[in-house]
Each structure stands twice: as structure tokens, then as C-alpha cells.
Amino acid sequence: MKLATMTVDGGAPEIGLVKGDQVVRLKQALPGLPTSMIELIARWDAVRGDVERATDEAATLPMARVQLLPPISNPGKIMAMGLNYADHVREGGAAMPQHQIWFAKCVSAVHAPFAPIQVPKVSDAVDYEVEMVFVVGKRGRHISRAAAPGHVFGYCVGNDVSVRDWQLRTPQWILGKSFDTHAPFGPWITTADEVGDPHRLDIRCLVNGDVRQNSNTREFIFDVYEQIAYLSQSMTLEVGDVIYTGTPGGVGVAMKPPIYLKAGDRVRCEIDGLGAIEATLENEA
């Protein structure tokens, strides 16, 4: 299944079940269903069957009628993985990591999948990073690798937008990774059962139609389940947490000379089976 958070005609956010180029408004098809994605995920075992069968024609709209929002607007935390594709490590001249490298993106950076991304006033070193994102579906601590698949609700396409001069001026990356609008993801959540194995998906980023990143999630150094097992040794993973899993080679900062994004550029991030997000860069007002 594909579940989106959206608005219709400027109304309040609601959840939609995406079916091709149509979307079922679940609040109309299934009154009484949770109206926030985190609440829906928390109750998923009880409501999944009803959602799967939601086919009310009166509650169905063409996708063109809706505005897609971030699938989860207020995750408890956003964690993101650094240096998790071998080609990305090599292009930066770094040693292959022996341990997982993690940083946080602030929740205030969460952004809709097709909304403009800001070039901030304080930097012109804005870079793209296409990433597969997963959403935690079950709370847990000290989760084993074997149990980890049961803690994934679903997957999205993300762009770990990075302000490189701010990121690299200190060892801690959080500021350079957390500018407003710099955590877009979506366009919806594709549930884990529909994805199957998340470690064999083609992943791409295009800038103004030019392919900059082109890889496959089989190139992970640490796979999704290893990530869950490692992270959960440090912190409790909560329902609705959003995890960015790393980016492949081809980023702008590694080009010689570096090529950064500027106002007017169009960035498209794609993952087979999960969809695509796309945005135009604009200068911060």
C-alpha cells in the first residue's frame, strides 16, 4: 500500500490511500480512522484490513486534485546515516567506515515532497543527496538484526539537502544538515510488505534533467536492518521516527570543481517502486 498525507482544496491535512493516479480519502471512506499518520501507524495491526479494502468511489479523487505534504510532519526524531555507499566514500577520499556514522536532522527541516527548497542567505554551497528513507512502525530498544524487519513500517524517497560549508566547518554535521526545507521526503509511504527486499532498489538523482547519482541500495555498506540494530542500542526507536539511510556517489561537493545548487535548479530524486520527489531551488526570502 501507498499512504500519503495531503490536503484537498486547502483543507486540513488528511491521509490518502494512493491507487495509481487516484487517491482514496480515508477520513471519508473510513470515518473514525486516525487522522494523523503516526496514529495510523500505531494502530496499524487493528486497521490494516479496513484500509486495504477502502474503495469508496465517492471518496476517491484524481491525484492531481491533492497537495502532497510530508508523510509525517512531526516525527519524534530524524536520524541520518553518513558514508553508507562505497562509491560515495571513495569519491570523497575517505576510509571505509568500520562503524556506522550517524547524525541528526532537526524536525524543523521536514518539508513537502514537491515544495521549493531554499538556498539560504548565509551560503551558496547547497548540495543534493538522494536517499531511501524508512519510517519506524514499532517501538523498540536493543532490537536484533533478525527482528529488525518487523520494526519498519514503510519506505519513502528523501533528499538529504546539505549546506556543505556549514556541514564541514566542524566535526558535527547537524547544523549543515538542518536548514529549513532541507529534509523533504515522500511522495508517500510505501508499506514494507509491498517493497519486499529494500536492498535491491535502483536509486537516482537528476539535476535539471542531468543524471548526477545512479546506484542501487544493494551497494549499502550497512543495510537497513543493521542500521536498526545499531541505532537501537543507543536510543529507543519510536513509531513515526524517520531514518535517512545514506546517499550514493555523484554529489556536487565531490565534483572538481564542486558544483552546487542555485536558485532555479530543478532536483528530482527517484527510487524504483517508491516514486519520486522533485523541487525547484529558490533563494531564501
Image (cartoon, grey):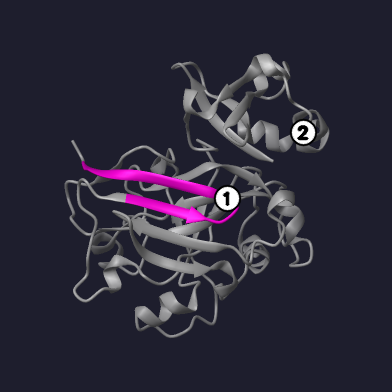
Q: Position of residue 250 (x, y in %)?
A: 36, 70
Q: Position of residue 240 (x, y in %)?
A: 61, 43
Quarter occupied by the C terminus: top left
**Mark 1 to mark 2 CA distance (whole Å):** 18 Å
Depth check: give the residue in front, 284 or 167: 284
Q: Is residue 133 left or right of residue 268?
A: right
**Does 153 appear above or below 209?**
above
In which image quadrant can residue 228 be found?
Answer: bottom right
* Residue indicated by mark 2: 52
Q: Residue at x 22, y 65 (%)?
A: 259
Secondary structure under badge 1?
A: loop
**Does 3 appear above or below 131?**
above
Q: Position of residue 35 (x, y in %)?
A: 63, 24
Q: Residue at x 18, y 54 (%)?
A: 123
Three-letter residue code for mark 2: Glu
Q: Which residues are magenta?
A: 267-283
Q: Residues within 10 Å of mark 2 (few under 14, many from 20)?
A: few
Query: What kind of secondary structure does the magenta stretch mostly adopt?
Result: strand
Q: Position of residue 265 (x, y in %)?
A: 25, 50
Q: Residue at x 40, y 82 (%)?
A: 90
* Residue indicated by mark 1: 274
Q: Is residue 211 left or right of residue 136?
A: left
Quarter occupied by the N terminus: top right
Mark 1 or mark 2, earlier in chain: 2
- Residue 120 is labelled as none
